[in-house]
Image (cartoon, coloured by chain):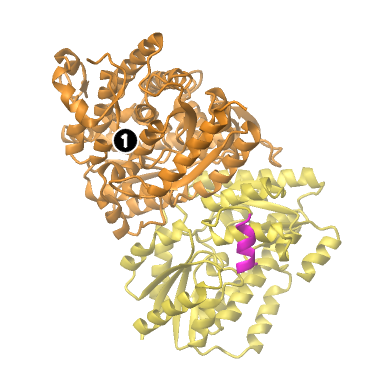
Chain colours: A orange, B yellow
Amino acid sequence: MFNDVKKISVMEWEERMPQVPEAYRASCMFLRSLVPGGVRYLFSPYEYSCRGDTLLRRLKFDSSLAALRLWAFIFSEKDRLFLAKEKGWKIFAAMKDLGPVPVLSYAVPDSLTFYADELWWAPCFAEESHLLDEAAKLGAGEELCFVRAALGAMKTLDYFPRPDLCIAGVGACCDDFSAVMQLIEAEGFPTHWWEMAVRFEPTSPIIKEAFLHSPGGSPYQRSGRDFVAGQLKGVVKRLEEVSGIPVTDAMLEQSRDKFNIIRSKVSELRDLVYGAKQPPLPGLEMLLAEFIAPHACSDPDEAVCVLDDLLATVKHRLSLNASPLTPDPLRIFWATPPTDAALITLLEDLGGCIAGTEYMISHAFFPIATDRHPFDAVAENCMDDPMTGSAGFRARRIVEGAKKYGAEGVIISGISGASHCAFDEKAITEIVSKELNIPVLSFDVPYSPGRLSAQVVNRMEGFMDMLKQRRKPG
Amino acid sequence: MDSIQSDRTAGIKIVGHTCHAFPAAVIAGLGMRPIRVICGASSDAESDGERIVRPDICPLVKTLLGNVSKKRGPHGKIDIWIGLFTCDAMRRGMDTLAGTLGQNVHPVQLPATRTRSSADYYADQIQRIAAELEIRHAVRFDPARAATWQRDSDAAAGVLARAARSGRVSPLDLHSMFHLFFVARPQGLAGFFEDLLAKSPVFESRKTILLTGSPLAYEDTVLLEDLEARGYAVLPLNCTGLSAVENGTPHETQDDLVKNLTLRSFHQPPCARSRPNRAVYDRIAETIKDSKPAGLVVKCLKFCDHWYAERERMRKNFDLPVLVFDSDYAEGGRERLLSRIDAFVEMME
């Protein structure tokens, strides 16, 4: 039953659940180092929808067990956080850097780190706005992007327990989340601020800076990396103070190695899936898998198992040339994660597939260098963050990705209110059109709980029709 | 404008910047003319900017881009821009200025945090820019020239600060004096201000309003006009007011003059973008205690997340009437703003 390759609805998954082998269920355990044997989490998407994430009922899912495990792993994160807190572990809320900080914070034993930013999806998945309403009461209204839901979540503590420390990256960051982080601190949450350096372009009038290249191939100024390394040292010092545990270089290296494994698996998965003519995994599962890279979804050990399972499924399907998508789909590169995950399902229903992404977390896929101190190596990774440089830099990364995966079009799903989107959209459209001569569709995704925005649907339909026309000979 | 043109004619480079935390004296020490460009705000300039960037962007950034693209006003006379990366909008605006508009922009990150290491990072960048300007434009940094500029600037700043704190200068006159301070050479400016104040009639205010928020462009005077007409004095506790002329946290003196000037500027009272921004609240609280204003106005530019997101916190923190509003430079916004002020004044009285 689980060998068929297709997309199924939430109720179809529900019907299949009794057939999930017990041995497989027993292999899906989180927090094995906290609870002897770990905690089972392999519940169906329907069950998670009953707990509040009702959008799951409108999505279509890959039919593999590996995908089931992925969904369950992602949606059980809050269970891990509450359980760990209850058992006395420290809970750290990383904010904004989307990748580097957990590499350091997971060096602290008996602790979990999650990203408060990722709560931006919560109102969409829950199809109700109470987190946004709570945030609005504190001053974070519609003028800010959906990351304001993180403030609401801090207030309600519905999605995570009270963090022992918030680690807030500011400076080279969007205005929206910077404002939200400030409001979080003002609500009394202990916060450590650290400065993210802007990545300068080597083509600017700068002549007195030494420029280096990151593992991601980005040129960056050495002074920025050195400054950030000092900032990260400050982060770890604060973590030591909060946890009462000295963090040694060996502990940092062990954590770095674990994250390098996770990052390499996510990278491999991306290349296998996005590089295939018939992608062996749908775009939604890939979106979820990509978001494991920044913080391992609050369980690095289980994250590795989840990714291994996905990789095995993908390799098996590639060997059979099996895909859950329609034959010969239109290849779309997607930039900026869509606030409404159902848009990915829509894209595939319209005959498309995801052929590459730039979800603003692309730095979390690059390896952390092992030939230098972790502070320097993680700082270098910070310099790869697409959001700390110019819109042109991000556009070039998108061009490289679209080229690599043979995209026929680019969709940029903007986030209403986000300070960077208004600039990104134009730069990306211009550079992609100029260098690749492929169509670009950009739109902001409004909050429309319970349904897709009709305007967005129309625009996507028109875009996909145009791409189909382009394929016709002559 | 005339003096800027005559400097250009004399071969002096005009260097534009936008933030009160930039050490203008460093530029003066290089034999160049620094000006802080918080002007040129108009509906037309904003529309011109919207041909370059999307409309949902900070009006100040849009007008900057629009004015540069049309070579309008002081913006059209800037030879070199100091691309101070402050908020995200200004950072990306400066990138657009360099990229799309091909301007000569020297990037520098103004850290949001106010730690010693971030101060040092800022100072290192300013030193780097000074060295690059020396090389690129074949000039030498003259410490005596920089020190003279700073001394004259401090003198003018002192007069302005006293005038603003006195509450006896009309809001519009005070606003003009601040903007003159941002663009004029400071030599003799203190004396000019003293003369002006001595010869001008004292503004007899009924009450004082404390003003904070985003930068207030030279032309953005609707609020000030209305309050002045009602007889209110305005205490401008923003970066185009007292925060630009009053020193903040004391700092260590360094041997290196460029570093010293930079640290001084860095420790000017910060804006809401600083992290954490408790100092902004402390300063407002202190001013409320000392000056006993009748109300607090937080004037935000549209899309200015750093200030506008503080609105509920402001209301909660201060026990006086608080008006928070956001506006752009479009003509149509005037009536909306006036009706908000009307309601606010009614509440105070």
User: Depth check: A164 or B140 in front?
Assistant: A164
- The magenta segment: B40-51
The percent position of residue B86, horizontal first and vertical second, equals 54, 52
Task: Give the residue type that dot 1 points to.
Answer: Phe
Whether residue B49 appears in magenta in the rendering, the answer is: yes
Q: Is residue A350 left or right of residue B35?
A: left
Quarter of the picture holding the C terminus of chain A: top right
Examine the rendering and report whether any part of residue A301 can be seen. Answer: yes
Q: Is residue A65 left or right of residue A473?
A: left
Whether residue A150 appears in magenta in the rendering, the answer is: no
The percent position of residue A172, horizontal first and vertical second, equals 51, 44
Q: Residue furthest top?
A: A319
Q: Which residue is mark 1?
A: A114
Residue drawn 56% across and 76% down? B221
Q: Is residue A433 left or right of residue A57?
A: right
Quarter of the picture holding the N terminus of chain A: top left
- The quadrant holding residue A237 is top left
How many numbered marks appear?
1
Chain containing the residue with disc 1: A
Examine the rendering and report whether any part of residue A171 can be seen. Answer: no
> Few, some or many C-alpha atoms within 10 Å of disc 1 (few <14, some 14-19, many ≥20)?
many
Assign a secondary structure to mark 1: strand
User: Depth check: A360 or A279 in front?
Assistant: A279
Q: Is residue A165 above or below residue B189?
A: above
The percent position of residue A8, horizontal first and vertical second, equals 27, 26
Q: Is residue B248 above or below residue B89?
A: below
Residue drawn 70% across and 79% down? B192
Residue drawn 79% across and 69% down? B3
